[in-house]
Image (spheres, helix red, strand yellow):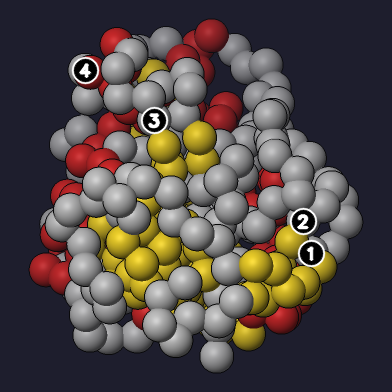
């Protein structure tokens, strides 16, 4: 233990699917070689955490401490680690470990590594006062500012950025599901002077007003055609039915990017909706390049997350609010 570190910590633990998280007191983990131990300042609450809780993801590890949008201070530097110092603020994303030797890793596509392990899913995450992370997958973060406001950048921001990269130079971009990821990438689009079109649940007046506040060119629900055809559609809502709907809204040569790790089945649709060199792509995790690029871009925009903070012990309430669509922006757990 480092001087001043407690022997135990509070953590919210998931023991099996479709059960609430349990507040428990656990030993503070020791950092193995190649890792750093962090005193967690804040951890974002992501829809992927809901998929884990509902048993919708393959190969989970039980019990598990969820959370993969982690902002913390380095508490202990493990053996063999350089470039990090005690007290330094860092962020930990979803992708938590890769083999580094397979063809995907060696070609800059580490997000596709077959042996990859993920934070808060197969590696204990940030719904705790302390956590341990592979130093290779920790990002330096600004020392100042509110930790809770930085947390959503570590997944919602990164996945939105990767989805936007896949859309190449698309100018008119549709955002389906105006939640944590969409409200961040919307700010990037506005900064780049690319119009965005916000699609929400039917009757979701609050989200539509939020999208207008962020500069949306058009707002409506997924069943309503936008004011003009899109060059790309980024899907953040996990509803497969949105794929054919988005295809009908993109112009020839346009792309539909499915940005979630889990989605309900995509219903059949006429080939005519795909014809015209339209494409459908999926986003699989993220790379360190995504993190470095987006975290460098964010302060230039500047990207500001709309957050609703919850104390660690109220993680179940935060997840329920996310499930019900009762939040604008992102929920974030704080350790105070």
Q: Could you tell which of marks 3 and 4 lies nearer the N-terminus? A: 3
* Residue 166, quarter of picture: top left
In the rendered image, the vertical position of residue 173 relative to residue 68, given as above or below: above
Q: Which residue is mark 1?
A: 21
User: In front of the other: label 3 or label 1?
Assistant: 3
**Residue 306 or 29: which is nearer the viewer?**
29
User: In front of the other: label 3 or label 4?
Assistant: 3
Q: Would residue 153 appear left or right of 290 to someone viewing this image?
A: right
* Residue 294, quarter of picture: bottom left
Q: Would residue 87 appear left or right of 60 to someone viewing this image?
A: left
**Residue 326 or 314: which is nearer the viewer?**
314
Q: Residue at x 36, y 67 (%)?
A: 76
Say whether marks 1 and 2 touch (CB < 8 Å).
yes
Q: Which residue is mark 3?
A: 98
* Mark 2 element type: loop
Q: Which residue is mark 4?
A: 107
Q: CA distance from mark 2 to mark 3?
A: 24 Å
**Residue 193 or 335: which is nearer the viewer?**
335
Q: Would residue 175 appear left or right of 292 to someone viewing this image?
A: right
Say whether marks 2 and 4 touch (CB < 8 Å).
no
Please identify the residue farthest to the bottom as the structure is shown.
336
* Residue 167 seen: no
Q: Position of residue 71 (x, y in %)?
A: 39, 69
Q: Which residue is mark 2?
A: 14
């Amino acid at each position: 233990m480092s001087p001043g570190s407690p022997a135990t910590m509070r953590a919210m633990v998931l023991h099996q699917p479709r059960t609430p998280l349990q507040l428990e007191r656990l030993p503070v983990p020791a950092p193995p070689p190649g890792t750093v131990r962090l005193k967690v300042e804040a951890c974002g609450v992501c829809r992927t955490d809901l998929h884990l809780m509902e048993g919708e993801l393959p190969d989970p590890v039980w019990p598990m401490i969820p959370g993969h949008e982690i902002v913390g201070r380095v508490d202990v530097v493990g053996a063999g680690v350089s470039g990090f110092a005690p007290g330094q603020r860092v962020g930990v994303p979803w992708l938590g470990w890769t083999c580094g030797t397979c063809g995907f890793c060696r070609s800059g596509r580490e997000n596709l590594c077959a042996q990859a392990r993920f934070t808060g899913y197969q590696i204990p995450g940030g719904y705790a006062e302390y956590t341990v992370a592979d130093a290779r997958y920790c990002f330096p973060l600004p020392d100042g500012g509110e930790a809770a406001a930085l947390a959503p950048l570590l997944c919602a921001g990164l996945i939105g950025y990767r989805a936007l990269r896949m859309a190449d130079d698309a100018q008119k971009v549709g955002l389906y599901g105006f939640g944590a990821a969409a409200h961040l990438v919307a700010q990037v689009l506005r900064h780049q002077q690319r119009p965005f079109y916000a699609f929400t649940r039917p009757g979701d007046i609050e989200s539509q007003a939020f999208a207008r506040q962020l500069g949306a060119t058009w707002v409506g629900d997924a069943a309503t055609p936008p004011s003009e055809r899109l060059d790309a559609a980024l899907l953040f809502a996990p509803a497969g039915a949105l794929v054919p709907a988005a295809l009908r809204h993109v112009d020839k040569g346009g792309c539909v990017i499915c940005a979630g790790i889990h989605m309900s089945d995509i219903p059949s649709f006429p080939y005519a909706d795909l014809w015209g060199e339209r494409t459908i792509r999926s986003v699989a995790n993220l790379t360190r390049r995504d993190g470095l690029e987006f975290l460098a871009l964010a302060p230039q925009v500047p990207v500001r997350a709309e957050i609703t903070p919850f104390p660690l012990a109220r993680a179940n309430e935060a997840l329920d609010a996310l499930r019900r669509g009762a939040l604008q922006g992102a929920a974030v757990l704080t350790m105070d």
